[in-house]
Amino acid sequence: MSAHSSASRRRVAANAGPEYDNHPELALAAVLQLLSRFPARRSPALAQAIAGHFRVIGSDQRLSACVRDCAARLVAEWEAYAVLGDGGDDPRALH
């Protein structure tokens, strides 16, 4: 993937966030999609994006308390995956 297309995706993702203000279910749908990609990629950036989505979901008062609490508990776990998911020399890690 080129640096240009990666930067474009980040801009689109950053711009898509405000839609969560009107449609909180989009944050849930987005995090499910991100979660489905993590096993194949094991990317620290992807883990950080997942943590960010859980942070948004955990703070959205329009969502049920059960969903918010679960999401809030998962933030730290996914932030840790971002640090540990670097892969280093692990040949099992896909980039």
Image (cartoon, rainbow, N blue to C red):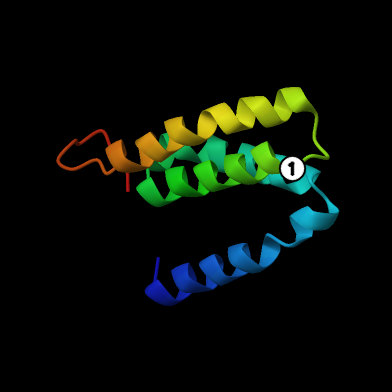
Nearest the viewer among 41 and 47 is 47
Q: Position of residue 44 (x, y in %)?
A: 36, 47
Q: How many discs mark residues in the rendered view? A: 1
Task: Residue at 51% x, 49% y: name it.
Answer: 49
Q: Secondary structure at mark 1?
A: loop
Task: Residue at 31% x, 41% y: name it.
Answer: 83
> Is disc 1 surrounded by few (<14), some (14 to 19) or many (20+) residues within 10 Å?
some
In which quarter of the view is residue 67 placed?
A: top right
Q: Position of residue 60 (x, y in %)?
A: 74, 42
Q: Position of residue 32 (x, y in %)?
A: 63, 37
Task: Residue at 79% x, 43% y: name it.
Answer: 25
Task: Residue at 83% x, 40% y: name it.
Answer: 62
Quick one: which residue is furthest to the top in this view? 66
Q: Say whether residue 24 is left or right of residue 15.
A: right
**In the picture shown, does residue 64 fall above or below 83?**
above
**In the picture shown, does residue 8 fall above or below 86?**
below
Q: Position of residue 61 (x, y in %)?
A: 79, 39
Q: Say whether residue 72 is left or right of residue 27.
A: left
Q: Say whether residue 65 is left or right of residue 22.
A: left
User: Which residue matches tag 1?
Assistant: 60
Q: Amino acid at mark 1?
A: Asp
In which quarter of the view is residue 82 placed?
A: top left
Quick one: which residue is furthest to the left in this view? 89
Q: Quadrant of the N terminus?
A: bottom left
**In the picture shown, does residue 30 fall above or below 93?**
below
